[in-house]
Image (cartoon, coloured by chain):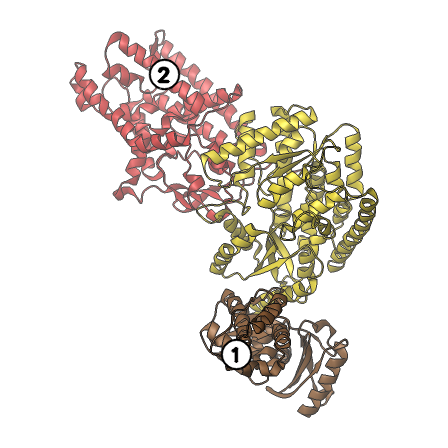
Chain colours: A brown, B yellow, C red
Amino acid sequence: MITAGIDMGIQTVKVVILKDGVAAGKAKAFSGFEPTKAAEQAFAQALQLANVKKEEVSMVLATGSGMDMAPYSAGNVSMMGADAKAGVFLFPSARTVIDVGAEEARAVKCDERGIMQDFVVNERCAAGAGTFIEAMARALEVKLEDMGPLSLKAERASPINATCVIFGESDVVSLIHRQESKPEIARAVFDSMADRISSMVHRLGINPDVVLVGGVAKDVGFIESLKRKLGISVLVPEDPEYAGALGAALTAASRKKGASK
Amino acid sequence: MKSQTAEKKYLPDMPQKEIEEMNATVKSASAKIIADNIAKMKKTDPNRPAAMRYFDEVSDFFGMRQKEIQAAKAQGKKVIGYLCVFAPVELILAADAIPVRVNSGWYDTSKFGDRIVPVEVCPVIRSTIGAKMINLSPYLELSDAVITTLTCDGMTKFSEILSDVKTVWTMTPPRVKDSAQSLHLWKEEIKAVKTQIEKLTGNKITPKKLKEAIQTMQKATKAFRRLQDLRKGNPVIMGRDAMLVNQMSMWDDIKRWTEKTDALCDELEKRVAQKAWASPPDTPRVIVTGTPMFWPDNWKLPTLIEEATPRGLLVGDELCSSDRVLYDPVGVDEWTMDDMINGIAERYLMASTCPCFTSKDGNEDRVNWLINKVNETKANGVIYYVVRGCILYAMEYARVKRALDKINIPVYYLDTEYTREDVGQMKTRVEAFLEMLSARVDF
Amino acid sequence: MYEALAETILAVIVGVGLALAGVLVVLIWKTDRSRKVSYLRLVVQTAAVVGIFFSFTQALWLAIFLLVILVATLFTGRFFCGWICPFGFYMDLVALVRKAFRVRYLTLPENINQTLHRLRYVIAAVVLVSPLFLGALTVNAQSQTNLLFLRDPDRSLGLMLSPLEPLIVPWAGSVATLSFVSWSVSYPYTRDIMFYINIPLVTSILVYFFIASTLLSTFLFRRFWCRFCPTGISLAAANRFKAFKWSPLLHINKTEEKCTKCGICKRVCPVQVTDVYEQKGGEITTSVCLNCTRCIEMCPYEGCLKLTLAGKTLFKSRNWLEPSKTE
């Protein structure tokens, strides 16, 4: 059976083609002003990579904040539901899935079947999401992908005001003037994010194993900080930003299976 | 009447032109929202009970009911507004006056309130201040006096702000329910407000009139409970419709409201017999608890719940703007004036589940009420709804969550504001929650 | 000869009265839901006091009657107090008079009520033991042996059963003798006062003082005597001894989740029991509760309070609210 999942994220659209229980094709594109078009592009690309024709796809489900604008989709899956499904698929021992995206972070508690039991979302604050890192990278005049490795060089973290991205940015500037080293500032950025995420997860209750997905999960600096703040290790899959789309495709597969019973 | 030329301490002197402009703008926006809400409710339930048409009519603030009250005032009747369900409505009725709840449910008036008080203040208060500034609320405008209950900080200072332009009678509830001195204090407050009402209306509240008023409200409670009972089984009425009926009880003529609600219940009972459900019986059943939600703008959450994918059903709530309004009757043993005042005092104080109290058992009254409601309506989940700024409700979340965790009912904390901008975000959360409830039901 | 006539007349009056009461109950049953159990209780109380009077004319009946009450109370606790006791009945009648005059009742301030509650055993003991000492004052040696219970040829009832004394007794020598039929007007405990304190003027003063004070306190405080009545306390105490803990089967039972703390039960209780209000669910076991079930009658939440006998619900609180238009 072939199903597909489209994650209409705010920054990027991700598509996963699931062929008989294996993620056969993955593609993404920048959402921009025309997310539907971007999704169509990414979809075509994923089909190519999976060597599958569009007609062979029996069901497409959409997720992400722009899910209502997804093309081809037969319905929606919540991001939390998709994360839970993907987490358990990638790591069968997963019971808590943390998803840190560009603008929002969320955590889901699930059972062994990937059914979500409870969830929590960071409320209207970008200081716990990818945008924060971008803003800080700008202030430090460092490339986004270099922030992680840079922070790993630090032995301690500089103190920064982690209440707000805007204030955080001016804080970073003042730290630079005080000649704090860039690695230490970078690490402080990740630490404060991890702090915020970890208190959010504590509200949910940490149930091991913990899986980290989402765009920010690619950043080694953040992973280290999160491990430190949570006090346990986290499992990170390959291509963590595709977890949402993967979860949507998995949900499509189980719905299709259920319907055909 | 309060002298309009007395120096105002809080409210600004806005130019008349601005007031008129803003009034017109918000009024037309409000009319649109009301029409929109009702249209959506009609769409969701194609067989919406015919009896709901009456309540739709009453829900138009600027329509029939406003004219009725104006006519009554012209004949000398007094209108007494109130901001909280602590106000003893029976006393107002016994003095032949008209009781109306005057909390504002308009999002657009918050920005005027923001000119006077910071944004951290309770949105309901800010919105009501704003509504007063542009003379929007017909009920507030028509009130000869307003009873405020000093249950929280917002209300406490709001009483001062409102007294710039209105006669405000404050009632101080004790913060601890269960001591002899608390009940004594509250009884004295009730007696004081009784005197105020008698002075304003010029009518003495005799035992006979008070008995009649209490019995009128008891009848209303009976009809009210009848409606809530019908929501316990398979869905015969959408939650938004029931909520509308509940809210109207605070603005409509209570005797007529009782009749119309009974007529609605008759219709619903026929639906039960015909098994004509408003929604499939396996729709996830949700209860909302938390800060009050006022018509029309605050239909945001109920609309999201009942129009989401997957669709949910609002089977009940623990809100002082809906399922708690008429739930408790005044119980009188011997119809002497003293016993009736005792009955009124105890009903309004002891039966309240407001988090404004502190107690040794952690507001067990509220927790028990909620658990009982969950069991009776067979709810699948609870949404804990808080408008940002309400510390009392926010702080009780931990208590309620623990109690509901024990009976394995999922709770979701949803905080929001008097704004339309977060509908998108709320939608994803509500849909995720409903998805979760569906999954639990399926398995 | 006059006795037989008086008995017949009395029987007719009582019979008619009971019939009327029965009709009244049925009529009120349909309309005033907040009082139907109360009226039923009045009928049962009337029947009980009439039964006691007639059983006085036949010693065997009296013995059976008393035996039934004794055994029943082993299982029903203070149900006797709420539904059978004639003294309680007189207090309820006084309450009816008070209501007719629209006079409000008083409640003891809570701290005094609690103190009285704690001292109730002491007070009951004092009342029961005092005959021992008073008996020594009077010349009667028998008084020390015929201490508490069924006793001597005076055909009075003994201190423990004094509350059962009907207002009219078929023998002379009580409070005021009706010589033409050699009956007398009587009142609970007065025979005991007259027996143990046999001092001419003092006795009369004490008897009338007792009658006046109990009637007045009842007029003001509803079932005042019941809060420390020796008979009542003994019944309750017996039920609470370890050996008898299993025996009381009749309880008022509360379902915690349905209670909204409206306080109606606390207000209508004639003995100011607050346990029904304060207790977190379960059986109400306080020894002050008379099982009069007024609280259950007035509780406006369906199924919150129940009267259970051996776990089975006899009746539960219902929505007594005025029926709305369409009912």
Q: CA distance from mark 2 to mark 1?
A: 87 Å
Question: Which chain is mark 1 on?
Answer: A
Can residue B332 be seen in this snapshot? no
B388 vs C20, nearest the viewer: B388
Look at mark 2 in the image and give the residue it sits on: C211
Query: The residue under label 2 is which amino acid type?
Result: Ile
Label 1 CA crowd tier, 10 Å (few <14, some 14–19, many 20+) = many
Do discs 2 and 1 belong to a common subunit? no
Tell whether B303 sits left or right of B63: left
- Residue positioned 40% across, 23% down in the render: C50
Label 2 CA crowd tier, 10 Å (few <14, some 14–19, many 20+) = some
In this rendering, is residue A121 above or below B33? below
Q: Secondary structure at mark 2?
A: helix
Q: Residue furthest front?
A: A178
Label disc, if present, on residue C208 of the rendered structure: none
Whole-percent x, y for residue B56 in the image = 76, 48
Q: Quadrant of residue A63?
A: bottom right
Quarter of the image for the N terminus of chain B: give it.
top right
